[in-house]
Image: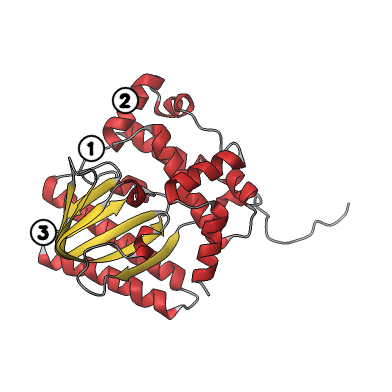
Amino acid sequence: MAARKKGKAQGPAPREHDFDPAGVLSCGRSGRVLRALPTEVVGSAGWILLFTVQGEARFGPPEEPAAIRNGDLSLFEPGFFREAEVAARDGWEFFWAGFIPRVGWHMHVSRWPRPARGLRQVHIGDAAEARQIRGTFLRCILDARRQNPFTHLLTLNAIGEAILRATAHHSRTFGPSVLSERVRRVLEHIQLHFPESLSVASLAQVANLSPSRFAHRFKEEMGGSVKDYLLRFRLSRAARFLEVARHEVKRVSSLVGFGTPSFFTRQFRRAFSMTPSEYRARMTAAKG
């Protein structure tokens, strides 16, 4: 009998879409009191997090705008800066970060109040907590400038801390928000299986609800439709792939779960006002 070779047991080979695209795309501080958003904020893919430290702004349609005030930590879903205007009033100064979230962060921010479509927001009324959140942005900016082997993790951890602090502050102030176990289970399923073919019917099975009941429950708790959430989730993952991987657009489309490259390109352009190829070229140029 041939001797068995010793060595470490080999687990299953990682799937290509197991790559974690989470990361901070850009971050900064409005260097002076502003009356408009910097172009780098407007152009960021993924989520955009703003912490207002002075002044006030309005987000959304003129007939029903949501206020963004001093002490507000405001989180915008992908593409919403291009779908609704942000108008500053009495000057506006803020810290900001554009980023692709880690798996699990969606469940934290789903507890935040939703004053407008595409916007989640927590007001940090405690001065000590506000200083802590301000510090997370300062660390993110500083670590992004240093560009060392740990920059990616340090900047992402800083933004993650801001989100967790805001979630904890909101829970202490108003009590924990109700996110049902059924919807939580579906969010986890989407985060792990987004490249696969997902539908309202298949996700309803995960929630153990009828499709109609599940769609209603999801919209009630998440503030938007299942289809809209899944689309934006996939687009945010695609943006990160385009930034850090060398796959062709066709391959990226497949990795994030779009049926055809043409449909992917249309949806990407609609969300970010540029094609996937244009976005990649812009990110490459920004890195120098």
Q: Is residue 108 visible?
A: yes
The residue lying toward the viewer, choosing from 83 and 203, is: 83
Residue at label 3? 125
Comparing labels 2 and 1, the label whose residue is closer to the camera: 2
Seen from this angle, which residue lies furthest right? Answer: 1
Residue 216's label in the rendered image is: 2
Residue at position x 46%, y 24% in the image: 201
Earlier residue among tags 2 and 1? 1
Q: Residue 241 appears at what percent x and percent y?
A: 54, 55
Mark 3 Cα shell of 10 Å, populated few (<14), some (14-19), many (≥20): some
Q: Residue 75 appears at what percent x and percent y?
A: 29, 53
Marks 2 and 3, Cα distance to the nearest angstrom?
Answer: 33 Å
Q: Residue 246 appears at what percent x and percent y?
A: 63, 60
Earlier residue among tags 3 and 1? 3
Left or right: residue 195 versus residue 219 is right
Q: Residue 190 appears at what percent x and percent y?
A: 46, 39
Marks 2 and 1, Cα distance to the nearest angstrom?
Answer: 15 Å
- In the image, residue 94 sits, relative to residue 263, either above or below, namely below
Left or right: residue 77 versus residue 125 is right
Residue 97's label in the rendered image is: none
* Secondary structure of residue under mark 2: helix
- Given the image, on which type of amino acid does mark 3 rest? Gly
Location of residue 23 by image quarter: bottom left
- Given the image, on which type of amino acid does mark 2 rest? His
The residue lying toward the viewer, choosing from 35 and 283, is: 35
- In the image, residue 217 sits, relative to residue 84, either above or below, namely above
* Secondary structure of residue under mark 1: loop
Residue at position x 36%, y 50% in the image: 82
Residue at label 1? 178
* Secondary structure of residue under mark 3: loop
Mark 1 Cα shell of 10 Å, populated few (<14), some (14-19), many (≥20): few
Marks 3 and 1, Cα distance to the nearest angstrom?
Answer: 22 Å
